[in-house]
Amino acid sequence: MIRKCLFPAAGYGTRFLPATKSMPKEMLPVVNKPLIQYGVEEAISAGLINMAIVTGRGKRSMEDHFDVSYELEHQIHGTDKEDYLQEIRNIMDSSTFSYTRQVEMKGLGHAILTGETLIGDEPFAVILADDLCLVDNGDDTVLAQMVKLYRQFRCSIVAVEEVPMDEVHKYGVIDGEMIRDDIYQINTMVEKPATEDAPSNLAIIGRYILTPDIFEILRNTTPGVGGEIQITDALLKQAQDGCVLAYKFKGKRFDCGSIAGFIDATNYCYKAFYSE
Ligand code: UTP
């Protein structure tokens, strides 16, 4: 079964400069909770208990976030402010956290390969915390939907969403044969295609389930678009050699790596969870 969730979180977050100069993008709060915590909560909701985080220079605050803060806890002990820390306490009690550093930021594929040391030889999930995925109360989270699918198909799965054609150049884009409602067996995948070269408008978003043979494929993957080692290229090889599924998930996704997406997520979460 899938126990581990990898969080590639070493990117520079240049679209959020200067906010991300000395602060990780993954620690930007949507209302009062950092993006990485939303991701971890989603992993826990899918039954995963081991969080494996790929960090980089200047990203230590993520490690501190998932640890106790004795001084702060002493300060608010016995006050009603203790409640504010209850959620994060529960997370720390129900899961483990391990970290490794990506020394050179050579792309998402390279970040995932860097995480091999934390994952080992077992299937695992990947969450890109800057894609915030939300579902209606009581519904399975996006990762929980994918874990259920993995139990049936036992192969790598990517989450996809239909995007407007003039936005396909921002994503990895797939094409494939629909084998069931919302499930495609992938036969083509292109990273950041021009509109006219895109095989469809089904864009890969930041949720994956990967089988561990992906590591060997990544080791042999040469840099692609932007000089980076692309997970899309490795997944295409995996699809050609065996099977990779694309799953059109149920739920909402906010691209919190972009300013507009981040603001949309903030407004949505404030209305949904915080306003009276
Ligand atoms: P992005 O390209 O969205 O993130 O990578 P970025 O590079 O941090 O952001 P911009 O474009 O400069 O604003 C997708 C995910 O992959 C991680 C990022 O942290 C993000 O979660 N990533 C990317 C790495 O961990 N290492 C890399 O070398 C590249």
Image (spheres, rainbow, N blue to C red):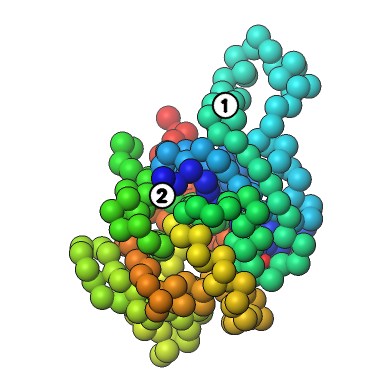
Circle 1 residues within 10 Å: few <14, some 14–19, many ≥20: few
Q: Position of residue 12 (x, y in %)?
A: 71, 63
Could you say which quadrant of the image residue 230 lies in?
bottom right
Mark 2: amino acid: Leu
Circle 2 residues within 10 Å: few <14, some 14–19, many ≥20: many
Q: Earlier in the sequence, mark 2 or mark 1?
A: 1
| Residue plotted at (37% across, 61% down) | 155
Q: Is 165 situated above or below 149?
A: below
Q: Which mark is residue 198?
A: none
Q: Is 137 situated above or below 239?
A: above
Q: Position of residue 169 (x, y in %)?
A: 49, 79
Single out the residue that lies furthest toward the bottom: 196
Q: Nearer the viewer, residue 85 or 108?
A: 108
Q: Give the position of the C terminus as an image quadrant.
A: top left
Could you say which quadrant of the image residue 189 lies in?
bottom left
Which residue carries the number 2 mark? 143
Q: Nearer the viewer, residue 102 or 73?
A: 102
Q: Position of residue 124 (x, y in %)?
A: 49, 52
User: Does residue 115 appear left or right of residue 199 in this picture?
Assistant: right
Mark 1: amino acid: Asp
Q: Position of residue 250 (x, y in %)?
A: 31, 54
Single out the residue that lies furthest toward the left: 180
For marks 2 and 1, give the CA distance: 21 Å
| Residue plotted at (79% across, 52% down) | 58
| Residue plotted at (44% across, 73% down) | 238
User: Does residue 210 appear left or right of residue 105 in this picture?
Assistant: left
Q: Secondary structure at mark 2?
A: helix
| Residue plotted at (28% across, 53% down) | 152
Q: Is 187 situated above or below 37?
A: below
Q: Nearer the viewer, residue 68 or 119?
A: 119
Which residue carries the number 1 mark? 93
